Image (tube, grey):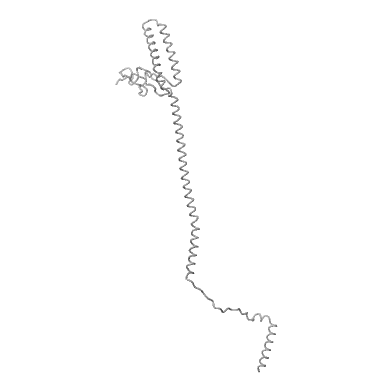
Amino acid sequence: MFKQAISTSTRALRSSSRFSAQTPIFRSQFAPAPLRAVSLAPRSRWYSDQAEPAAKKEGEAAGSSETKEAEAPVGVEAELKKKLEAKEKEAIDWKDKCLRSVADFRNLQDRTSREMKSARDFAIQKFAKDLVDSVDNMDRAITMAGDKMTAMEKEGKAVDEDLKNFYEGVKMTDGIMMSTLAKHGLERFDPEGQKFNPNEHEATFMTPMPDKEDGNVFHVQQKGFKLNGRVLRAAKVGVVKNQ
């Protein structure tokens, strides 16, 4: 009976082999899938309490690095802006110092120029003060000779030729001297008939005169002198005082 079972299974296998050779499509469709080797070794899982803090630290580190990267350009820009403002302030300070230095230098130039001009114009001031006394004496001689000649003419007398020559000579000398002094800035002025000016005139006396305007100079006792427009000596005058 065992032999019979074996022969039956052998015939079945042959018939199945013929069937599979004749019908390949059905073999491919109904062929069993290959078995995969499955490892039955037990797997071990490890759990650690430090895993979560480490991940947290890594996240915080990543976040801080991103924050630093984001804040880095802002910090550099602020620092550069601060340096730029400091440089601008320094430039403004230097510009102000430069302008002040230029202004001081120009003021010094102007002051030096004025002082040099003043020294040049009034270098002979002391000499001129000593010289005007001699000019006054010459002017008095001319005045006296002229008054003498006028009195002789009024009396009907002939004018002395020596007196006339003396008058003409002294007057000519006086004219040449005043012309020479005028080249150096020394000028004589006669304020008779002018309004009294306390900056140029020295009133020696006052008297009422109804026929003249009040405050006018009617008599010149001593003529004045100017050196380059500055009063070297005030003129001594008599002034009308009607009030």
Specify the quadrant that holds the C terminus.
Answer: top left
- Seen in the picture, residue 5 relative to 96 is either above or below; the reply is below
User: Which is nearer the eye, 165 or 41?
Assistant: 41
Q: Position of residue 122 (x, y in %)?
A: 43, 24
> As displayed, is residue 123 above or below residue 75?
above
Q: Examine the rendered structure and indicate whether residue 100 appears above or below residue 190.
A: below
- Nearest the eye: 94 or 195: 94
- Which residue occupies the foreground of this view, 38 or 25? 38
Question: Which image quarter is the N terminus in?
Answer: bottom right
Q: Residue furthest left?
A: 243
* Total numbered labels placed on residues in the image: 0
Q: Give the farthest residue toward the top.
A: 157
Q: Position of residue 64 (x, y in %)?
A: 48, 61
Question: In this picture, is 67 found above or below 170?
Answer: below
**x and y percent of residue 49 in the render?**
47, 71
> Can you give x and y, in whole percent of width and height, for residue 68 in the image?
49, 58
Instruction: Looking at the picture, tell me which residue is in the foreground, 147 or 25.
Output: 147
Q: Quadrant of residue 15?
A: bottom right
Task: From the viewer's perspective, tell me whether residue 7 is left or right of residue 195.
Answer: right
Find residue 235 and report its image quarter: top left
